[in-house]
Image (cartoon, rainbow, N blue to C red):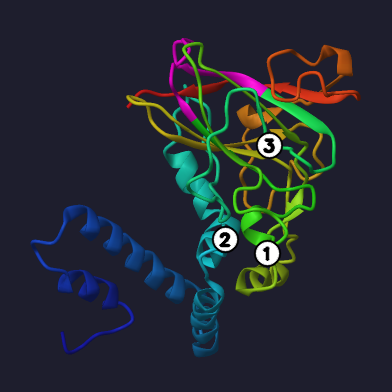
Amino acid sequence: MRNVTKDNITDVFKGYMADDMNPRMREVMGSLVQHLHDFARETNLTHDEWRKGLEFLEGCAAVETEDRHEFVLASDVLGLSSLVDMLHSRDDATSSSVLGPFHVSGAPPLAVGGDMKRHFGGPVLLAEGTIRDTDGRPIPGAVIDIWQTAPNGLYASQDDEQDTFSFHGLMTVGDDGRYAFTTVKPVEYTVPSDGPVGDILRACGRHPWRPSHLHYIVTAPGYRSLVTEIFPDDDPYLDQDTVFGVRDDLVMTYVERPAGDFPDGLALSGTISEPFLHVDFDVILASD
């Protein structure tokens, strides 16, 4: 095409795509370029603004490391990560929520009833529940990957003072589908705002805060894997999560209980002398 114009360039692009290309690739790339071109035409995008956009992408690449995933963070704060989650969540299962940029693969085994709090200060939290199918039956042998921030609001991958797998554990449930572990009460925290994503937040007049939460990845043969988070109902940022991760069914309540109510059979049984927090949260997995 010799006569490319602002009005026909989108169709010209689509015409350049090979006839035998992957149909899904054709659909996704065609729609992406359609929206990009429509965005530029609608806003009458200037050269300076276009360069700023490229500088943002280059800035993300410049700070991207094995432990810092700025592109994932950009997707999170723009709402794209949560939108993709919601597009593919099942109404009859626990809602998915953002993976976030701080998950560390290869967490060590954590026995049912095990402890992740270790030597860290802060209120003890006992989190437990049952992993069930959509008919309410326990799922034996399900695996739950658990992680959270330390009391300083940092994940292990952000903090040189923490072990690599601090506040990470991989638990395999028994025939009853029951999981249980102790940890420190999670705290609200800010996403990294010293890079290009922080510039976007400030330009939009937005804060970088996330409500406190526990992360779960739950898997079992024959079921759809679930990536999710659970949030306490008294967190001050519950209604303004900067990465849009909160869903109604992921909000739970921490109940303060006296030390004498701490159950037997857990790693910390017999060591609790002060009131502790307790939450019982079931996870529902949908079949493949």
Which x, y percent locates residue 220? 40, 27
- Residue at the spot 42% in from the left edge and 38% down from the top edge: 88
In the rendered image, residue 131 lying in the magenta stretch gets the answer yes
Q: Is residue 80 left or right of residue 119?
A: left
Residue holding disc 3 = 116
Residue holding disc 2 = 73
Of 139 and 165, which appears nearest the observer? 165
Q: Earlier in the sequence, mark 1 or mark 3?
A: 3
Q: Quadrant of residue 68?
A: bottom right
- What range is drawn magenta here? 128-143
* Marks 1 and 2 in Cβ contact (< 8 Å): yes
Which x, y percent locates residue 271? 83, 24
Give the residue type at disc 3: Met
Compute the Cα span from label 1 to label 3: 24 Å
Element type where label 2 sits in the image: helix
Compute the Cα span from label 1 to label 2: 8 Å
Of 160 and 14, which appears nearest the observer? 160
Q: Is residue 113 left or right of residue 20?
A: right
